[in-house]
Amino acid sequence: GGESQLFLQPAYDPLIYRAPDGSYQPRLATSWGYLGRDHKTFQLTLRQGVVFSDGSPLTAAAVKAGLEHYQSSAGQVAAFLRPITSMEADGQVLRLSCDQPHPLLPMVFTQDFLAGDVISAAALTASDQLATHTFGAGPYVLLPEETVSGYHYAYGPNPKCWNAKARRYDRI
């Protein structure tokens, strides 16, 4: 839900960052766009050399696994991913094919939608830890020993963060 997404954002980076002025900026994706004019094929090129807090690499296959997870969930973002009928992962390039024009994909892959905040593919198989640990590429990691779910969340630096300059505080 909205509350959990708010508390997860320090630990997860989006594919595309929606800046305060509304513009879309590169984050985990360095480029993106529609191929052709029908808005049915969308391609993302991912940043090289990024690792998640669990040490696994950011790849198109990892993003694909996360999107497939969200597609099969009962969450609100599943409706925005439903038009995607196939995903082709090749190294750092992910190509999405849709069964209808889908001009909202850049927005869906921002921090405003859960699908934009990429999770380690390895974490998807560790569902017992998802409620108490974070598995993102953001500037922080959740400190489970200092967190009380639904009340108080504590974060410390993610030592594997690719974008350490985004970390303004030692703890939040």
Image (cartoon, rainbow, N blue to C red):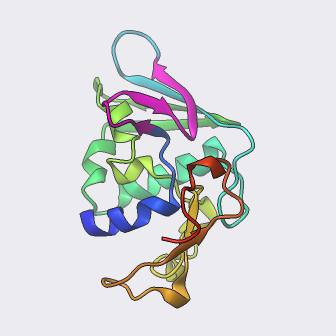
Q: Is residue 111 left or right of residue 171?
A: left
> Could you tell me residue 43's position as x and y percent?
51, 26
| Image spot of residue 46 (x, y percent) | 62, 36
Q: Where, quadrant-wise, is the N terminus in this rendering?
A: bottom left
The answer to whether residue 151 is left or right of residue 91 is: left
Percent of width and height locating residue 134: 54, 70
Total of numbered circles in the picture?
0
Is residue 10 covered in magenta?
A: no
Q: Residue at x 54, y 77 (%)?
A: 133
Report if residue 1 is visible in the image. Answer: no
Residue 124 versus residue 71 in the image, above or below? below
Residue at (49% x, 76% y) in the render: 130
Per the rendered image, the range of residues in magenta is 17-34
Viewed as shown, does residue 152 lie left or right of 167? left
The structure residue drawn at horizontal position 25% and vertical position 63%, both measured from the top left corner, is 2
In which image quadrant can residue 159 be found? bottom right
Type of secondary structure dominating the magenta stretch: strand
In which image quadrant can residue 143 be found?
Answer: bottom right
Q: Is residue 1 above or below residue 17?
A: below
The part of the image, by quadrant, that contains residue 3 is bottom left
Is 106 rendered above or below residue 122?
A: above
Residue 75 percent across, percent down from the top left: 28, 61
Which residue is depicted at the point 54% across and 38% down?
27
Residue 19 visible to the viewer: yes
Residue positioned most to the top: 37
Pick whichever, 149 or 89, lies toward us.
Answer: 149
Residue 155 or residue 59, whichever sits in front? 155
Q: Is residue 30 magenta?
A: yes
Give 40 or 23, whichever is nearer the viewer.
Answer: 23
